[in-house]
Image (spheres, helix red, strand yellow):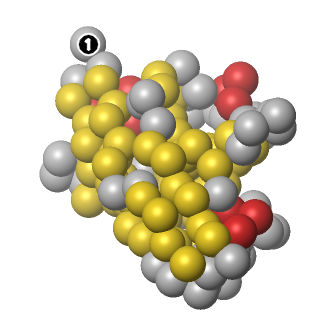
Amino acid sequence: QVRLVESGGGSVQAGGSLRLMCATSGNPYNFYYMAWFRQAPGKEREGVAVIRADGTTWYADSVKGRFTISKENVANTLYLQMNSLEPEDTAMYYCASDPSRDVKNWASAQEYVYWGQGTQVTVSS
């Protein structure tokens, strides 16, 4: 059984930093793609960053240069270091994973089978 549990969210002022963590359990085969998504009230869930098992990463344009995704491979723990946070980054952040070796659109929530419950990030101006 796959389980994803996010932590590390909180409230910060603009310009601040947070580090999100996603602890996992289950067969490592299911963590080939691991991603962070976010969803603000009234908006669709959007892809923030993804990391593939070989270490390849992709980022949404809105977070490039500010956020860094990383993964600790022994325990398959996922991280998202968020710097220079902006009020527009306020959202619920979700960890997601998928075992597929052929994800077509990493930023699409439909590509991912497994999801965590989310952790709230609030950035004030």
Whether residue 114 is visible, yes or no, is yes
Residue 65 in the image, given as x and y percentages of width and height: 66, 83
What's the residue at 71%, 69% (across, down)?
Answer: 87
Quick check: 34 left or right of 105? left
What's the residue at 30%, 20% (across, down)?
Answer: 2
Q: Quadrant of residue 102?
A: top right
Quick check: 39 left or right of 83? right
Does 46 sit above or below residue 50? above
In which quadrant of the rendered image does the N terminus lie? top left
Does 92 sit above or below residue 85? above
Residue 6 in the image, given as x and y percentages of width and height: 36, 43
Does 6 sit above or below residue 9? above
* Residue lying furthest left: 74
Does 12 sit above or below residue 52? below
What's the residue at 47%, 64% (across, down)?
Answer: 11
Q: Quadrant of residue 60?
A: bottom right
Residue 117 in the image, given as x and y percentages of width and height: 43, 28
Between 68 and 32, the one nearer to me in the picture? 68
Q: Amino acid at mark 1?
A: Gln
In which quadrant of the rendered image does the C terminus lie? bottom right
Kindly identify which residue carries mark 1. 1
Between 22 and 39, the one nearer to me in the picture? 39
Residue 80 in the image, given as x and y percentages of width and height: 45, 63
